[in-house]
Amino acid sequence: GAVVSQHPSWVICKSGTSVKIECRSLDFQATTMFWYRQFPKQSLMLMATSNEGSKATYEQGVEKDKFLINHASLTLSTLTVTSAHPEDSSFYICSAKRGQGPNQPQHFGDGTRLSIL
Amino acid sequence: AQTVTQSQPEMSVQEAETVTLSCTYDTSESDYYLFWYKQPPSRQMILVIRQEAYKQQNATENRFSVNFQKAAKSFSLKISDSQLGDAAMYFCAYRSWAGGTSYGKLTFGQGTILTVHP
């Protein structure tokens, strides 16, 4: 079964609203979670790295005030797209790293399809 | 910064035949991981195979095997006895061994869309 749960799987909302996406590790503690964005038939682009109890590390070019990331517990990270506009429409995928060591695997959520009207 | 390049946007193969997907990468690190992920139309990311850079032996998982050439920075995926269910987008990915604030992050290639013909 899935070890990382991402919710919602699909959301449609009006331009100007904020949307929150949740990423939960179901049976392990994830000190580090990652948020990716993917356009159709393109690669996954890392947006930010979320570390429990500290501020997220954003990749160059990603607007911190637009994409708010909170990692309040060892099993939950959230991505909030603030004042969403049609250009924010995309597929967002989270992943969670099990454990601290370099050999630990990374598990992906099933993704969230975000459509802004 | 590390980069991963997949030069084949699309590939096709006949069912039961063998296909090889190419991947090259650039890094100054000596220790790292390389992965192949499969993304079917459902868009779920599925780990196909993993290779540790310090291992000389090529990884194998059933019908999937890699040709890891560390000096050439090449990491190709061979799919033997292709099945219809193998049709998907395949991504090559790099992960550093080293620590840091983005410890464990994956750098993906552009992807290769694989079509399997019956």
Image (cartoon, coloured by chain):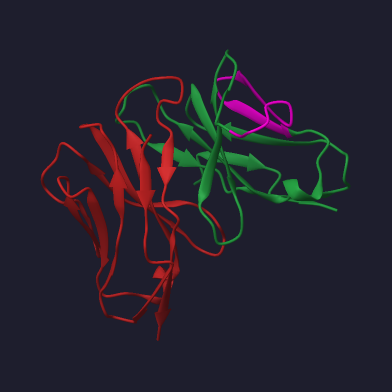
Which hue belongs to chain A? green
Residue B9 coordinates in the image, percent (x, y): 43, 67
Most common secondary structure along the magenta stretch: strand
Residue B99 coordinates in the image, percent (x, y): 35, 21
Which hue belongs to chain B? red
| Residue A36 relative to residue B20: left or right | right
- Can residue A81 be seen here? yes
Image: magenta residue range = A61-80
| Residue B68 relative to residue A56: left or right | left
User: Residue extending furthest left?
Assistant: B56
Residue B15 coordinates in the image, percent (x, y): 34, 82
The quadrant holding residue A17 is top right
Number of numbered callouts drawn: 0
Which quarter shows the N terminus of chain B? Answer: top left
Residue B42 coordinates in the image, percent (x, y): 57, 61
- Can residue A11 be seen here? no
Q: Is residue A71 magenta?
A: yes
The quadrant holding residue B112 is bottom left
